[in-house]
Amino acid sequence: YDDRDGKIWMDGKLVEWRDANVHILTHAMHYASSVFEGERCYEGKIFKSRQHSERLKVSANLIDFDIPYTVDEIEAAKRAALDANGLTDAYVRPVAWRGSGEDMGVAAAKNPVHLAVAVWEWGAYYGDAKMKGAKLDIAKWKRPSPETAPSQAKAAGLYMIATMSKHAAEAKGCSDALMFDYRGYVAECTGANLFFVKDGEVHTPTPDSFLNGLTRQTVIQMLTEKGIKVNERHIMPEELEGFEQAWLTGSAAEVTPINQIGDYNFEVGALAKDIAMDYEKLVRA
Ligand code: PMP
């Protein structure tokens, strides 16, 4: 993906896509001092753009560094990247990281902090599962306790177990993996949050060991406005069997119905489809 035409916004300048490189002694590469965002631009407008930029800065603070750009400057950088590539419908990926310093130790308080924004066209995150429902594996890796890692940060280090879980899932022909948390509760997928339906009510795990996604928050609000009760609570794995419908939410994933988790099957039902359609409308409104 690195050797192609296009422009990437990097540390205040638009650079050629193939020249947007970092040095091998970048602290982030060795010690995961990196945070990022995943956003979608629809018809020229990034959905919840400002909230994403704000979360990027919060994520950096949570892993102990400051991004040397204001939210307004990050907003302008995203706009510049979209314009430079002539894109109105695109995935937007800001990333901030610690560069190299005087030595290569763990401590990096004086290392420079960098920011880049790349944008590219990215279709449905789960491909045709968007229509027919995603099949999920159950990951062997558990989301860590918030005392073990800053689980509200969208930080690269938290994706090590996500990548391993997703690879294991894909090897079994699944789209993604459901992860339990350190206590054994149902948590989320490797890049998306989870919702379940039973007896006309919605149940979604309490985000106390994983990212409280912006799409998750949007969908909770949409359901509440429809008069549907949303129960945010701890969900036990044995409850999966009793749920009728399920779906995933995420900026990249949007709202994607689930038709299977491990050995359990789910109907791609009316509510899952309605919410997927309503979200589609909302992001383009
Ligand atoms: N959990 C993880 C691990 C994610 O990577 C994402 C995608 N950012 C989400 C949840 C969903 O978050 P959002 O709706 O803010 O994109």
Image (cartoon, rainbow, N blue to C red):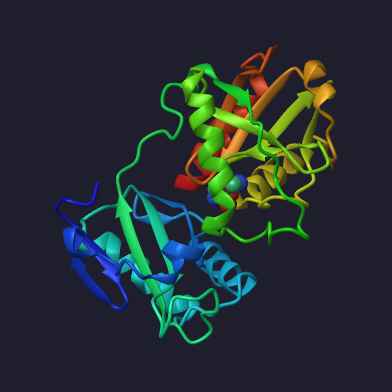
Q: Position of residue 245 (x, y in %)?
A: 70, 21
Total labels drawn: 0
Q: Is residue 53 above or below residue 112?
A: above
Give the residue at x 79% y 16%: 241
Q: In front here: 71 or 16? A: 16
Image quarter for residue 117? bottom left
Image quarter for residue 216? top right
Give the residue at x 73% y 43%: 225
Q: Position of residue 7 (x, y in %)?
A: 20, 62
Q: Position of residue 234 (x, y in %)?
A: 85, 39
Q: Is residue 173 above or below residue 111?
A: above
Q: Which residue is situated farthest in the left direction here?
A: 5
Q: In front here: 27 or 18? A: 27
Q: Using residue 259 as the reference point, say whether residue 4 is left or right of it.
A: left
Q: In front here: 109 or 202? A: 109
Give the residue at x 49% y 46%: 283
Image quarter for residue 116? bottom left
Q: Is residue 262 above or below residue 94?
A: above
- Asked whether residue 200 appears in the rendered view, the answer is no
